Image: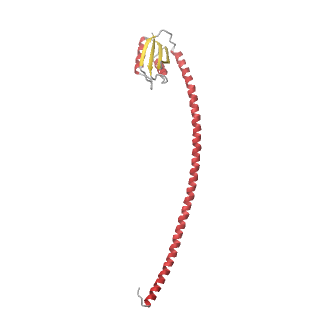
Amino acid sequence: MKQRIILRGSRVHDVGYRPFLLHYAQMNGFTHFFAMNILKNNEQQVHITLEEKDEAIDSFIHYLSTNKPDFAEVSDISSEIFEGDVVPIGTYLQDLQFEQLCKGIPAILRIEDSQKEMISLQKVMLDKQDQMLSKQDQMLSKQDQMIHLQQDTVDEVKGLRRDSASYLEKEFTEIKKKLIAIETALTREGIQV
């Protein structure tokens, strides 16, 4: 029996529906099979024609009502008697492979262009990273200079403190001697402090 099955939905194209259908047909020994995407009144459709035994067609329709590719959105499945010729499944397989190859080549070229663009952007990013590393090296060098200057300043302050402590100790000793001499002189003169 020859049958045409029509899948309708908002997303039945570009989701791998035809390879999905072909896989089922091959796994179940179909001999004559064809499927094509059609856009009719802004509605996506997949038209499947096959020539098989009634039981095989019924099983296929049941399978379609419970299975679909990921991302496919099916709203309706219908079937009708088909009067035309249905190509052998091997011919359809070759046609589908050729069509997919024709779709794949531009996609590969777009990917290649995208990769070139990404490589160009990566080079720009690497240049910027090199600039940042150079600036970080400059900052680290300046930090090293600052640390050296800070150490020199700390050493100088410590030296000043030692010098000041020694100087002040001598001065206080002199002042203390002079105060004792003044106190002694005042005591001799009868003045109590």
In the displayed structure image, the side of residue 142 where residue 47 appears, left or right: left
Could you say which quadrant of the image residue 143 lies in?
Answer: bottom right
Quadrant where the N terminus is found in the figure = top left
Q: Residue at the bottom extreme?
A: 189
**Up-down: is 139 above or below 28?**
below
**Up-down: is 95 above or below 175?**
above
In the displayed structure image, the side of residue 67 where residue 84 appears, left or right: right
Q: Is residue 153 visible?
A: yes
User: What residue is shown at x 48% (from left), y 83% (from top)?
Assistant: 178
Residue 17 position in % (x across, y down): 47, 22
Residue 81 position in % (x across, y down): 44, 10
User: What residue is shown at x 44% (from left), y 18% (from top)?
Assistant: 7
Residue 173 position in % (x across, y down): 49, 80
In the displayed structure image, the side of residue 94 where residue 78 appears, left or right: left
- Indicate the colouring scheme: secondary structure
User: What residue is shown at x 51% (from left), y 70% (from top)?
Assistant: 161
Closer-to-camera residue (188/169): 188
Could you say which quadrant of the image residue 60 lies in?
Answer: top left
Quadrant where the C terminus is found in the figure = bottom left
User: What residue is shown at x 59% (from left), y 41% (from top)?
Assistant: 124
Instruction: Give the total of numbered labels.
Output: 0
Residue 185 position in % (x across, y down): 46, 88
Closer-to-camera residue (173/28): 173
Q: Is residue 56 visible?
A: no
**Up-down: is 184 above or below 48?**
below
